[in-house]
Amino acid sequence: MRKKTIVWESFSGNGALCNPEALFRQMVDDAKYREFRHTWVLSTKAWDSPFRAEFAKHPRVDFVKYRSTSYFERLESSQYLFNNATFPAEFIKRPDQTYVNMWHGTPLKKMGYDIENGADGARNVLRNFMSADYLVSQNSFMTNEMYLGAYKLANIFDGAIIEEGYPRTDSMFASNAGDPARKALRRRGIETDGKKVLLYAPTWRGESFYKPNADANRLKATLRTLRERPELQDWVVLLKAHQVIFDQLTDDPEFAEFLIPNDVPANEALAMSDMLLTDYSSIFIDYLATGRPIAFHIPDSDSYSSDRGMYLDPSDLPGPTSRTDQQLVENVVDMVDVDRFKSAFPRESERYSKLASELTVKDDGRAGSRVLDVVFGGNEANYKVRRGFHDGRKKLVVYLGGMITNGITSSALNLLNSIDSDEYDVTAFFYRSGQRDRKENAAMIPGHVRQVIRDASILQLPMLGSMNDLENTSFEDLSESDAAETIWDWEWRRIFGHAQFDVAVDFSGYSSYWTRIVAHATAPRKVIWLHNDLVADAEREVSGVRPHFRNLTGVFKLYRDFDALVSVSPDLDRINQKSLTRYAPARKFTSARNTINVERIRTGTGGSMASNFAAGDYSLQNLGHAVKALGQFYSYDEIITEASRQRSLSSFVGDGGGATFVTVGRLSPEKNHARLIRAFAKIAPEEPDAKLVIIGEGPLENELKQLAVSLGIAGMVQFTGRLRNPYSVMSACDCFVMSSDYEGQPIVILEARVLGLPIVTTRFGSVESAMEASGGLIVDRDEEELAEGLRTFLRGDISARAFDGDDYNRSVMEEFIQVVFGNTNEVMTEKSPVAEPITSTS
């Protein structure tokens, strides 16, 4: 690392702008910092900017292009890093670097997790914040609402928050305030000297990002209306466009006399302005410090507020609001000077004073010097620098698995809903996927859980060279060397920055790649889940291939790095302890049953079958609204197909005929649906009105359907595919059946018990605890025995007994807390030896 070197970046290199630009200018020629060298990051489109020309010959300033090789080299080797947004997902902060994030505004619009389903959009922002040593905050509102609240940094951020105002506002108080902006405009033929300036600075909307021309037309209409008003003839009306639409406007000749160049910092434009016109942009907060009037033009306030959400209601804004251009002009005319603003809008003026005192008290022209004194001088005691955001809750980080619809994902979601968020701070992390199935499951993570979503990225590894697509590199290639251990340390730090936890949990336990990441967590205790008879799962063949063999044998080798190996039932614990003894000592093996989502099960039974594919909080009372809502997530062909399937299923289950058996599970070998279908075929001649409903999808679906056809019972068997809400179907059936060869903990049996269904199941290692006191029947793993079990139900000899799911969950959570947290002060020193991988017994 090169000492006394700094990387400066604004908006992914879109220019030298905002807080980094302001702080750089204060520092670059200050004698106290003359030994520092500076690197500015600029994108290709900003490469020929006046800023670069200004500093091209400066002996201590150079430039790199965003995402170039030189860019990443500087990120890896410079001592100080400054950004007002985010470094890319590949970036890994070194422990000996100092990262200062100077975010680009106090938010008016909702941010991060405060946005509905906002976790995905927040992923790289949160990652940057957790990596930062300092976060610069304009005020306490920003600290509490955005940093600690919207991005859930409370209890997890280990750096400092400098609450000393924004360096970018210092230029508004300089003796030459506004002169740089006036000069830049003069070069474009726009003269502002001796004139009053009305600055229009709207933010961007989702619509304008994808259809900027529509937004441009709206902007033109508003600007023309202002220009044509006689009372504003002596004013210069200017537009400071948001960056995402600037490129769409700059080539339009109609904007030539309005548009402020993108490389003119917004605060320089504010400094020369006598009145600000904006909408939902947080730029107005900076302007509060000037005491000059502000008007708000929000023609789409209802839709914008409902779509994005706001921290301030329009009625709380410090200036008059308008929805039409005519209303806007009338408001602006009444505000042509400060005194008229105060007399024409007394309530807005009062709110202005209140917000200014709350949000801009530190924006006094000296914010930059205070930030420099903290970061480079280490003088925190004299300033408002906040540290120590821990609230006393124990911190738990959980890798959830692949988030596909299976038992592990269901159990993980149930667990997250059951953990007491008042006692435990929970972070869930998983791989980002565009697959609908995984996205829908991720959307079910409860709101109190912090989501850390990992992007697939090329890691910058100076020790080993660049290793592309690390996730697909074989475990054997990244096993025991010191260099490999460094990779995993870096990968953990890339995802979680400085964050530390009390316990790290691999709740999946099926991927050596992810298990290795959890093993390198910054947590004193590490725990891994065992959801199945894992040796049997490693040996299991599908179409002649053992899909889990390589991954699981890699996982088994890593058990030495974990403090507890948690099977999901006592029966399963005994099986795994016996079969995996070569990989870990007996004292590490333990068990904790999985929770069940009792509320979801109960709620699901009362819902329409349409709830199987509806997403979000949409009303289904109106058919048109329902179809429109579903159309946001599915094609109309998919909706029609699903509606036909649901109608067929509803008719099949609810026709009032004979008994209906139901099973739920992935259509894969260990579930042995073929045995169930053959057993059902044996009773079909005796009970011609009986029916079998098979809920689930998987690799054996076509094979199982062909089996039903070959046995002549296709009309009596309904394959539903995957249902997001199987409970409405299950509750309409008469008996639950399971035909598995082995299971971890058969959660679906517990769900059937919550629904009050009688149960017939085959005997496997972990079935006893799930069936205890159920009133159900356990039979041998044989189709004749299973058929006889179905007959036993039909004779009326099996009935369900009451099951208190809430009481069960309370007991299970006590088990979970005990096995997960154990004694977190105990540091494991003994590691079990590495064993040879399991070999096939065939």
Image (tube, grey):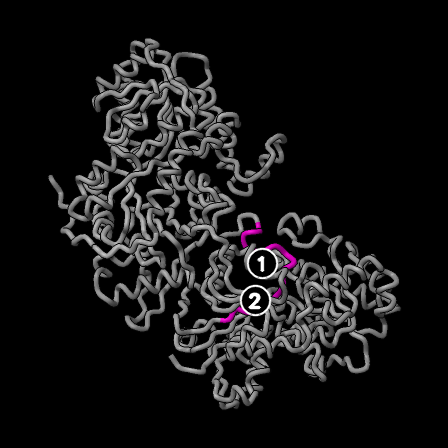
Quadrant location of the N terminus? bottom left
Residue of label 2:
103
Residue of label 1:
146
Q: Is residue 113 magenta?
A: yes
| Helix, strand or loop under label 2 | loop
What stretch of residues is rendered in magenta?
A: 100-115
Write down the quadrant of residue 699 in the picture: top left
Q: Is residue 149 magenta?
A: no
Of the two numbered discs 2 and 1 in the rendering, the one whose residue sits closer to the viewer: 1
Q: Nearer the viewer, residue 360 or 2?
A: 360
Q: Left or right of 349: which side holds 5?
A: left
The residue under label 1 is which amino acid type? Met
The residue drawn where x is 55% and y is 78% is 372
Q: Left or right of 291: which side holds 3?
A: left
Write down the quadrant of residue 794 in the picture: top left
Question: Height in image: 188 above or below 130?
Answer: below
| Residue 314 screen position, x and y as percent | 73, 53
Q: Nearer the viewer, residue 452 or 595?
A: 595
Q: Left or right of 162: which side holds 565?
A: left
| Label 2–label 1 contact, CB within 8 A | yes
| Residue 367 screen position, x and y as percent | 63, 75
The residue drawn where x is 32% and y is 9% is 795
Marks 2/1: CA–CA distance: 10 Å
